[in-house]
Image (tube, grey):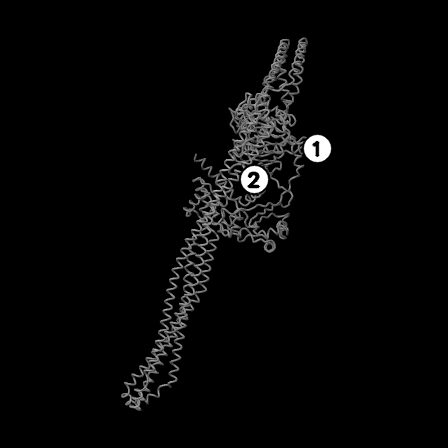
Amino acid sequence: DIMTMAVLDDIDRPSQEERDSHYKPGSIKRVKLTNFLTYDDVEFNPGPRLNVVVGPNGTGKSTILCAICLGLGGQPPLLGRADDARLFIKHEKDQAIIEIELSPKLKSNGRPEAVHIIRRIIDRDRGSEHGKGAGASTYFINGHKTPLKGVKELVSERYQIHIDNLCTFLPQDKVGNFSGFGKQDLLVETEKSLSGHLYNTHNDLIELEKALQSSGTDVASLQTELEKLTKENERLEREKELMEERQSYIERLDLLQKKRAWLVFDHKREEAKAAKEAREELKKKKKEAERTLRPLAEEHAKAEAEASRYTGRIKSLETKAKKDAKTMDDCIAKADRYSDEIDNEINQYNIIEAERRNAERAVEKERLRLEQIEAEGGDFPSAEEMEQTLKEAQSEMRSLKADISREKSNCAGVMEQIDKAKTERDGADNHLSRLKDDKKLRLQRLFKSAPNVEQAWKFIDENRKMFRKPVWGPVAAEVEPKNQGTAACLENHVANATWKAYVVECKEDYDLLYREVREKRGIPINIITVEKVTFPQMNRMYSDERMEVLRNEHGFYGYLDETFTAPDQIRQALINRHNVDKVLTGGEAVQNSLERKDLLEFLSTRESHDRRPGKQSSCFYYSFRGQSFKYTNQVSRFSGEIGSSVDTIGQARQLRPGSDPGLKDRLAETIRAADELIARLQPEADGSQATIQELNSRGHAISQRFKEAKRTKQEYGHYKLKLKNQRDKLQEAQENASKDNEREKAKRVAKIKKLMENSLSMSENAAKTHSEIMKNTRILMGVKLNENSLKEAVRKLADQLEEKKAATAELANQFQIADNDYNQKKDTLRKLLREAESIAPKEEWHDRLDQEDLPESLEEVEDALDEAEQKVNSITDNPHVMRQYEERKKDIAKLQAQLEEADGEKDLKRKQLQQKLDRWEASLINIVNKVSEKFSAYMKEVGCAGEVRLYTAGAGEARENGDDDIRYNFKDWGVEILVKFREASSLQVLSAQTHSGGERSVSTIMYLMGLQNLMASPFRCVDEINQGLDERNERLVFKRIVENSTLPAKSSNSDHCGQYFLITPKLLPNLDGMENENITVLFVFSGPHNFNNYLDWNVDKFVEDKKKFLSLSQGNEENVVNNRSRSKGKKRKSK
């Protein structure tokens, strides 16, 4: 909840002994709180000088002062908050503990005495329920129980700590009381803060003055005193009776305690019975759940086996489908081959038939033309050549047809693959296009968490034409990390405000955006101006040579600005504000370099071209075993050495991708694979088509050549027939008539039939196989549908089984808890039985406790115990009453003797008064003059005037007039604070009726500052004294507090003005003196909107980052200030 951190480097801090020597005796060294108001458990160590406690309202700053007050024996009314200490116990807690360690005094040899640790325990159940909690607290000093009186003696007498004095202890609810003091009260509080001697002397003077005023009637006074003593003796007689009454209450208290022990035992026994019954009930439920779990598990196993059987059948059907497809392809190929052979045989048959017909028609005709035909016969080639040409053409045609068929089949397969790849690529591309709009998704996420950013973005988006140059942002939407590891590092390094900022490129756009969004619409907005992009020409922090060593030998990848892509203006803004160009990133090898290669020394050593003295700071990120870390190495301005801090980096939130990166990678891989497949197959498809075209061209040429050869052969046949008929008409006619052409035709017909039967058989086989394939496909689809349904059923059964197992496990857990609770209650019951038997054995006390007039219920017994205890405590135990009674009688006798000496008493008292008055008045005047001198100087610093005066109630005038019997009126003496805040006014006494809250606050703190070096208390506390002050006065007041509270020690480290606690909810920026080593800042991190863990806050890192930020963006900040000043001026004019 609280972390104490002085603004010093850890490596330059002195030893513990050296630090302890700076604490003034009685200063607070340590405070520990448990269940106190807003704190569960906290421990912190204030510094020996000025302690500034800061934190948001309601987080527990004033609680620290409450703890100091109550922990040192103070009571709640001193705080002005409550009158019962039990109200300071944290809600729903039974006990609060305050522990305060005080700095010890020093012995004569300079060594410290024993340390005093004061511990106060406040118990909600102790003390009267309707009282003020007087009996609720228990005190301990160094572990030993101590009454409140002992604590007060240690605090006020030994260490001069006065919690009840507003000059030294001014809580928040008492700030107004101080400025409302009358002059008499102010003198009393001032005396208490300076020394107990002044205050005691003042009281003695008041009493002596009263005695002098009544000295004229000494005899009557002595007689009155005598009567008083006589009455006192009578009172002592009554006290004897009270002692007897007290003893009777003590005996009743003992009986009630015995009765309560047995009643508590009976109550716990009933609780144990109830716990046992609950345990047995849960045991039955658990067994029933385990019994119903088994059938469900068996049904799930059976369904899984059935699903496995379906999976096996699907594999079998798929294997058969592949085999049938191959068989069908073989049948189709054979049928095609038979078809080609049938065509050839038909051609041969047709040739025979044609020859026969020609011979019959040409027997007579061709005889006359013998000579003509013989003359024409010389133009024909030989029969062998013609036959060879025809066969070659047929062979080429057949081979070419097979090649075309094969090439078409191959081309169709390739085009099918290309079409399928294009379909997959287009689907993946459309899906990836929707996922790639990360900027839109990040904007939506950012707008959801920061509505102000969305409102500003809407204005910019709707009015972009108003701006001179582009407006970028928010920054988180413009940055695209290369991976999630670097995204986490980048998000950790850059401030959250920057991620939500917008970037403009000129001052005019800055003014326009600030005026329209911030001033007119009241929307908070962060604006960064980047007028020039310079990073492409920037010089890197490390030379190329050193960077090469860092990459190769130490595992670094590069700079942080290389881990993301963004518009140039966004990148330049991140460089200007957060130096992302100087931060390194690396992998797991960096850890090895840190452990074995002295990486930090290497990074802190300047390169040869860098002539600056000393070492250099550095910052880098790296990953190790799945976790990212940040190393910050800072050069101490005191020792010049490197101080390192290591932070663990969580996952990126602002920069996490809008969608699953793995899904995008898979889609991109699908597109890439499809493109590669298309690129690989397209040339093959184009080549196949070109080949088919070329083969078709060749086929056309071969077909022409075949037709020509066939025609030539036919003409030659005709020629031969004609010639033969011409030579021997009858002989050729007989030969033609007797020639066995029918046999050849029959042979051809038989072969054609055989080929047709084979072709038909192959076609039928192919058709039958195709039918089998279709049938098998329908069966396969049905089996797959059944398998899917069965798998869904298995999944549902698995879900039911898991739910049942979880329910059974929950019952088992509840049973275990109930069993533990029962066993615990049994142990408690045994313990209570032993305690009850030890306090009041049942055999001895059972009947007696029932017979006594005692309450029967536990609540009534508790009330009776509180009442009896209150009665006992209300009667003070005084065993020496008789001795006091006898001594009082002697005093009465002595007083009677003094009546005779009363005449000289008046002169003696006057002399005593004058002696005390001279010393007291001289000291008081000296102190008031010193305070007035400082108060006047301090008021002058803030442009005002002031004076402190001693008010003597007219005693000075009486002494000047020479009155013998002076009335000093010591009870009316006081201190007056006179102030003047305006030039035209005069000095006036400070009062709530005349002066404002801010004026009273300034006057109060300046008066306390004037007293500071004179106070006896080792520490002072002031809570929110700066409330109501304007910025100028707050700065001046804070400067005065710092200067007064951090003055150098004198003769020793602890010889200074003491410890000072200043509580404030805020501090103005750029305050003077904050770098003083005597200032300790206590940051309160309690509350719902602060850090989850106090270790998340690092003062040194914050100060260093702030310095860097101011040095890089000073110009931007001046623009903001000037713009705001102009806007405020316009508002004042408009009013």
- Mark 1 = which residue? 111
Q: What percent of the width, then of the height, locates residue 862? A: 54, 25
Q: Does the rendering let one see residue 577?
A: no
- The residue lying toward the viewer, choosing from 20 and 72, is 72
Residue 760: mark in rendering: none
Tell me what residue is drawn at x 41 percent, y 48 percent: 465
Q: Earlier in the sequence, mark 2 or mark 1?
A: 1
Residue depicted at 46% across the width and 60% down the height: 673
Q: In which quarter of the image is residue 1013?
A: top right
Q: In this view, does 172 lie above or below 739?
A: above
Residue at image mark 2: 1094
- Drawn side of residue 497 relative to residue 909, left or right: left
Figure quadrant of the C terminus: top left
Query: Helix, strand or loop at disc 1?
Result: loop
Disc 1 residue type? Answer: Arg
Q: As rendered, which of 360 and 641 lies closer to the eye? A: 360
